[in-house]
Amino acid sequence: MAKKASVIKIIIFIVCAIAIVIYGFNLVKDRLPRKLVSFIAPTKITVMTYDINYGMGMDNIYSLSRIAKIIRSGAPHLVILNEVDYKTKRGFNDEQARRLAADLGMEFTFARNYEIDGGWTGNAILSKFPIEFAENKVFKHGYGQETKSLLHIIIKTGNDNIHLFGTELSADTAISSIQAEELVAFVFEWDDNNPIVVGGNFGLSPDHKLINEMTYYYSDVGAYIQPEGFTYPSYAPGKRIDYLFANKFALPVEVSVLDNELTRVASDHLPLVAQFKIHY
């Protein structure tokens, strides 16, 4: 009995010691160098990029609840959404970003690209973290139905500012190449030694010159998936055209495409998900 009591005392002591260390670390971490903090207690965030095809599935059924279920299954902290509608007839007059954010308990920001079917379509970002800053950069090249933009938010985790950029490039590769140059130039304006993740539907295969240019500056996270990481078309994936790119401060530790019975019917794209370790 005495031996059992001693073991219990040792366990209690260890638990108390760990609690004291964690409490002390939280008290002083704001005064420590970011590199030291990220080494001792690295931040991990999960990011998803998903072209939702305005909620219309391959079975010709419109369902945002199905899209929300898929997003929830990936457990992301941040979600880049393409082809998101705002009060269109085809989208049953829904404010899609708002509805999805409410369903998932996330904050959101939405950026219009162009008018369609009585409303607008564009990009959105959902976030489990408070959105500290949001802006939308409309690309100079591409007008009317080819108007595209780069949505940018900043969120804060502890002392870390994390930049997330979401876009859908033009289906015209000549235009999208110029848009990609604008994208890189704009992201560089914010490249201030903080973690950066860029994602969305680029509409191009990994061997395209534009993608090669992106990988010169940022790691192509989807390239970690073996063997292919295809995202399009959802019902018979054969292309990798949805991407997540990250700078050196966001290290991918897990990457996957959500490919299952539900995702193959909910949209014409499959979602790409990556978990990043934030480090300096």
Image: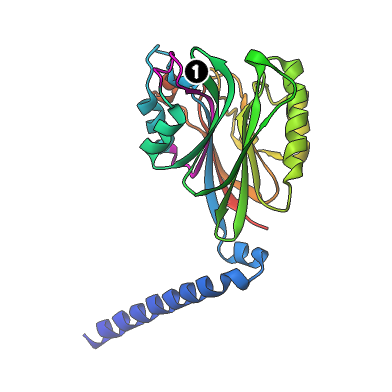
**In the figure, is residue 94 to the left or right of 175?**
left
What range of the chain is rendered magenta? 74-93
Image point (39%, 23%), residue name? 261
- Toward the viewer: 76 or 2? 76
Tell me which colouring the rendered structure shows. Answer: rainbow
Taking 250 as reference, is 152 above or below it?
above
Residue 70 image offset from top left, x and y in percent: 41, 31
In this picture, residue 174 sits left or right of residue 65: right
Instruction: Check the picture and name the quadrant holding the C terminus.
Output: bottom right
Residue ID at (58%, 29%): 229
Q: Position of residue 183 (x, y in %)?
A: 72, 32
Is 267 drawn above or below residue 21 in the view shown? above
Q: Can residue 92 be seen in this view?
A: yes
Indicate the position of residue 102 as horizontal and vertical percent values: 38, 37
Residue ranking furthest to the bottom: 2
When asked about the image quadrant of residue 19, the answer is bottom left
Asked where in the image residue 139 lies, by quadrant, the reply is top right
Pointer 1 residue: 119
Left or right of residue 98, residue 273 in this image: right
The kind of residue on which mark 1 rests is Gly
Does the magenta segment cover residue 229? no
Q: Where residue 162 appears, x then y in whole percent?
A: 61, 49
Near mark 1 (Cα within 10 A), the count class, few <14, some 14-19 or many ≥20, is: some
